[in-house]
Image (cartoon, rainbow, N blue to C red):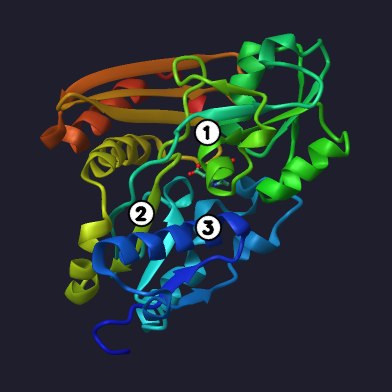
Amino acid sequence: MADTSTLVIGTRGSPLALAQAHETQERFAKSHGWTPDQLPLAVIKTTGDAIQDRPLSEAGGKGLFTKELDIALLEGAIDLAVHSAKDLPTTLPEGIMIAGYLPREDVRDAFISRRFKGLHDLPSGAVVGSASLRRQAELRRLRPDLNVTLLRGNVQTRLAKLERGEVDATLLAMAGLRRLGLTEHVTAVLETEDFLPAVGQGAIAITVRADDERVMRAVEPILDAPTGHALAAERAFLTILDGSCRTPIAGHAHLVGDELVFRGLVLRPDGSERLEVSRRGAVSEAVSLGREAGTELRTRMPPGFLDA
Ligand SMILES: NCc1[nH]cc(CCC(=O)O)c1CC(=O)O
C-alpha cells in the first residue's frame, strides 16, 4: 500500500460517478489540505455499466454496480470507494463497510420535458420513460393514462433520448443533475410530499475495508452526521422490505431539529396499490425506526404484494 498520505479512490467511470469522486477529492482538500495527486482515482468498470438494454432489476440488481469495486477494495487495489448510496445493496460483502456519507444533495426527483410543463400537463397516452421501478409505479398511480416505458442509460444518454423525441418526458434525480451541472434541463421539481424519493437518493456513500482504521480515520472529517442518521433509518427500512429487488419502494428520512422524520412506501408495479408509513423518533433510534416502519408495511401488505 502507498504511504500514509496517499489514498486510492475507486470509482465507476460514468460522468456522475466521476463527479462524485471529484467531490470527494475536493472535500479532502478542504478538510485535510490534500492535493488530488494524494488521492489518485482508479476508474473501475462494473458489470452494471455494460448492461443497457434491460432493467437492472432483471439483470441481477444493485450489486452489479458494486461488485468490482468491492473486489478492488478487498484486494487492496483501492483504499476507499465512492458510490451513489441509492445504488448500494443493503448487504455488503464480508470485510467491507460504509464509513459514512458526504453531505446530502437535493433528494427530490425532477420532471424533464421539452413540451410539457409538469406531470399533470402531460396529455393522455404521453410516453414517459424511466428505468426506476419506483418512478414507473408512482407515475402509473398518479397518471394511469400515461404510457410508461423503460428508459435506460446514464443521465446524459437519457437526456439525449428525450431530445431525440424517443419519450415525451422523463424523471431524474435532482442530485445527479446538480452534480453534473445539468439543472438547466429541469422543467419542474417534484416535492417529496408528492413523489417520495428512493432510499439513499442524493447521498454519496464511502465504502472502506472494515478493518482499515487508517482509512476510516482519514475519511471521518469529510463525513456528514445528519446524512448518516437519515441513511441509517432509510437503509434499515429497505433491508426489511428487500425481499425482492423488483418491488417499487421509496423512503426518505430527514432531521427536524434533533428529531428524525421518516416516510416510506411500497407500490404495486402497476400503480394499482400504494401503502405508506410514517415515523418520527430520536436520532439514536434511527435503525429501529426504519426497521419498525418496514415491519409495519410488511404486516399491512396483502399476500403476494412483494412478488407482484
Ligand atoms: N440509478 C442511477 C442513479 N444513481 C444515482 C443517481 C442520481 C444521484 C442520486 O440519486 O444520488 C442516478 C440517476 C437518477 O436516478 O437520476
Ligand 1 positioned in quadrant:
top right
Disc 1 residue type (three-letter): Thr
The disc placed on residue 19 is 3
For marks 3 and 1, the one nearer the N-term is 3
Is residue 6 depicted above or below 243 in this figure? below
Q: Which residue is mark 1?
A: 247
Disc 3 residue type (three-letter): Ala
Residue visible at 62% across and 60% down in the picture: 14
Label 2 to label 1: alpha-carbon separation: 17 Å
User: Considering the numbered disc 1 on the image, is that residue within a helix, a strand or a loop?
Assistant: loop
Q: Which residue is mark 2?
A: 91
For marks 3 and 2, the one nearer the N-term is 3
Tell me, yes or no, if residue 304 can be seen here. no
- Percent of width and height locating residue 228: 26, 44
Q: In which quadrant is the C terminus drawn? A: top right
User: Considering the numbered disc 3 on the image, is that residue within a helix, a strand or a loop?
Assistant: helix
